[in-house]
Amino acid sequence: MATESTNTETKSGGSRMIAFVLIGLAVLAFIAGYLDDYEGSLSIHPMDQFEVQPFFGAGEAELSIAPGGEGEAGLATYRGETLPVQLTAVELGALQDGETVSRSAEGAGFGTVGLFTITNVTFWMAMAVLAVILLMVVGTRGRAVVPSRSQSMAELAYSFVRQMVEDVAGKDALPYFPYIFTLFLYILFANFLGLIPGSFTTTSHIAVTAVMAFAVFFTVTIVGFVKNGAGFLSLFWVTSAPLAIRPVLAIIEFISYMVRPISHSLRLAGSMMAGHAVLKVFAGFVGALGLAGVAPIVGVVAIYALEFLVSGIQAYVFTILTCVYLKDALHPHH
Amino acid sequence: MEGDIANMGQFIGAGLAAIGTGAAAIGVGHVAGNFLAGALRNPSAAAGQTATLFIGIAFAEALGLFAFLVAILLLFAV
């Protein structure tokens, strides 16, 4: 018995060491990425990590500018596409003297984000979907009675969310379990993938989370009216309150119902954005302090661990609020 | 020192808005502390209420994040 307990202790100690080393390496890589432009001061901007950029950027490819176009413009051609480029006075003079003028493809206006451009956002969204598929389809392929590690992780996630839907929204909410489980897994993986140094946190963008929150809002509202008809409106009529203040309460309840998608999406996007901005602010301190930057590195490690926790909790919170809203739709009577 | 008085107002406003995040921290601490106080009195009932705990924390936190959003909007979108 005694040997067994020491065994498990050393085992957990060993895996804890490995976890610490992994987190340390991740943090170092995170910081190293920002030390490139070290100028002895706070040279990095905490918010530029949220910029949407084309994934296959035209980038730095040098283009020669051909004379032509109207007024003080030249023509740049890149991959068969031609754009007019506004020229500076120096460039215009050089062109008129017969010299060659070149610009980077990005500077000439290529590689801007259009409606169907593959950006870092779409790339990391696809990565999150791939990760979900990897866990749930490939991981459970064996269908063993004694599950493998990946299968037991998939089963754990499945039973966790199923239990949550049943506890919070009731048994008759189980038909909506696949939708809720999809939301949970997608948000969880998007949050965790965003913690990889150099990656992009898709859930830090309000546009991404708002789509999910409004989808939940419309689904819940439609389900509420389909299941209860006009009785769904009794959600706003609090019968347990005195009759005199019920109209006032109805207005408040209505406002709080309508503001749901906003707070639902803002909570996820806000906490992801805030956490990552703080991480980068601390990474900037490392660059600014030079050798004394060891202290902020410790801070970054701690915040990274906190962010890991927040990623899981925010996915959980988003899902459980979906369950709460669904419960309101299925059982609107107070 | 450069910039105009409007920029200064923008930064002061962002700083004032950031106070709200601290207020949200008080709210979250209040929820968690009261949960712990109740859980220690009746540990057997605590496990079933963790979902309620997280919902409460989420609602308290959301209002702090609104303040954070206002600060960010003041800094970058005005």
Image (cartoon, coloured by chain):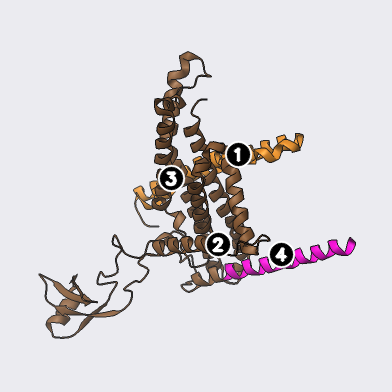
Chain colours: A brown, B orange
Residue A85 shown left or right of residue B70 in the figure: left
Most foreground residue, A52 or A148: A148
For mark 4, does the 10 Å Cα neighbourhood hold few (<14), some (14 to 19), or many (20 or more) residues?
few
Which SS type dominates the magenta stretch?
helix
Magenta range is: A1-28
Mark 4 or 3: the one toward you: 3
Q: Which mark is residue A167?
A: 1
Amino acid type at circle 1 is Asp
Look at the image and tell me whether residue B26 can be seen.
Answer: no
Q: Secondary structure at mark 1?
A: helix
User: Quick one: label 4 or label 3, which is nearer the N terminus?
Assistant: 4
How far across and down, in percent of the image, does residue A29 sit? 55, 71
Q: CA distance from mark 1 to mark 3?
A: 21 Å
Q: Quadrant of residue A114?
A: bottom left
Q: Which residue is located at x 55 percent, y 39 percent?
A: B60
Residue corresponding to mark 4: A16
Quadrant of the snapshot with the N terminus of chain A = bottom right
Residue corresponding to mark 3: A213
Q: Secondary structure at mark 2?
A: helix
**Chain containing the residue with disc 3:** A
Q: Secondary structure at mark 4?
A: helix
Q: Examine the rendered structure and indicate whether residue A281 appears above or below residue A248.
A: below
Amino acid type at circle 4 is Arg
User: Quick one: label 4 or label 2, which is nearer the N terminus?
Assistant: 4
Mark 1 or 3: the one toward you: 1
On whether residue A231 falls in the magenta region, the answer is: no
